Image (cartoon, rainbow, N blue to C red):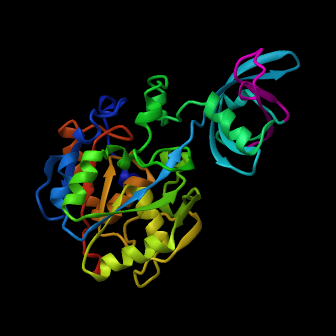
Amino acid sequence: MRTDLFDFDLPEDLIALQPARPRDSARLLVVQPGVPLQDRSVSDLASFLRPGDALVFNDTRVIPAALSGTRTREGNTAHIDVTLIERLDESRWQAFAKPAKRLKPGDLIRFGEEGKVCYRDVLNATVESKGEAGLVTLAFNLHSAFLDAAIAAQGEMPLPPYIAGKRAPAESDRADYQTIYAEKEGAVAAPTAGLHFTPDMFAALDARGISRHFVTLQVGAGTFLPVKAEDTANHVMHIETGEVSATTAQALNAVHARGGRVVAIGTTSLRLLESAANDSGEIEPFAGGTGIFITPGYRFKAIDVLMTNFHLPKSTLFMLVSAFSGLDTMKAAYAHAIGSAYRFYSYGDASLLFPQSPRSSR
């Protein structure tokens, strides 16, 4: 499909720079194909679900993957910002560097303050190689848990570029850009639909008889990238590592067998479950990488309802929601959201999407 079919104009002042407080006070646009749009609150979510439904959350934990350092070369220095995106082994990461033009293989980047002797404050990396669009491979002077501790001490939360370009990270982002159920470290971007959930919401869902289940997808920075190819067939999807346990797979299959619905909280949960599902719709245990790219025409196998934030124009995620609820439906929904001043992207408002056709007939 042509990529420009998924383009739309978004006023910059609708890009949320701070989260809603409290988290569940964010707005919720309910999108049911063939039914008028409903403007509600995230706190109303339970009222759109039925006893026996199951919510699936991504329990990944975001690491403070944004680092600032100084490149040294033959006595000359330059400031370099780095965002870690994929761990290669115990001491090597792939990262985006800015400005990458100031780097070449063999350069040393020192992170932290000069004169410190604690290992946390002596974090260095050598540029092993350079790729396109600012991609570099870094070999750190620490490894394993020592490297993890140093990154945690020196790093900032890796806010998406549409936020980081407008304000500096704050201490509050360490909590704000993390779900309340985050557990398994490794993501460099948050599963943002989950940012809306609070203990009070969990209590309301429990009271309605709606179960909660967890999967893990280590979200990469590529989730923010627009599709640059003119045709979606020419786009190469980034690979992310995920896991669906045998216990979770069995529980979700039982939900379907009882007539309940599986509700994905976020596109990360949806993409992982669709990767784990076989052609008959049964969810199987899964562990490994997935680069699933969902565009209109895709036959959904595992997911019945999707809660997600509002996404970038021409992004793989807007293509995904268009595949789920229909391109015309989502264009109309986004036009309504823009006209009604919904807040967009990671710290923005949410939508609750129902499919354009029931899962059993897809």
Position of 252 relative to 233 (above/below): below
- Residue 172 image offset from top left, x and y in percent: 43, 27
Residue furthest right in the image: 74
Task: Report the front residue among 351 and 259.
Answer: 259
Q: Quadrant of the C terminus?
A: bottom left
Q: Quadrant of residue 121?
A: top right
Q: Which residue is painted at 41% across and 85% down in the image?
A: 280
Q: Quadrant of the N terminus?
A: bottom left
Kindly tell me whether residue 299 is visible in this rendering.
Answer: no
- In magenta stretch: residue 72: no
Q: Which residue is painted at 40% across and 35% down in the image?
A: 176
Position of 154 relative to 76 (above/below): below
Position of 101 relative to 28 (above/below): above
- In magenta stretch: residue 118: yes
- Residue 137 image offset from top left, x and y in percent: 74, 43
Residue furthest bottom in the image: 280
- Residue 261 image offset from top left, x and y in percent: 27, 71
Kindly tell me whether residue 180 is visible in this rendering.
Answer: yes
Q: Which residue is painted at 22% across and 39% down in the image?
A: 25
Q: Quadrant of residue 241?
A: bottom right
Task: Report the front residue among 338 and 31.
Answer: 31
- Residue 310 image offset from top left, x and y in percent: 32, 46
Task: Report the front residue among 277 and 255.
Answer: 255
User: Which residues, given as a range, are shown in magenta?
Assistant: 106-131
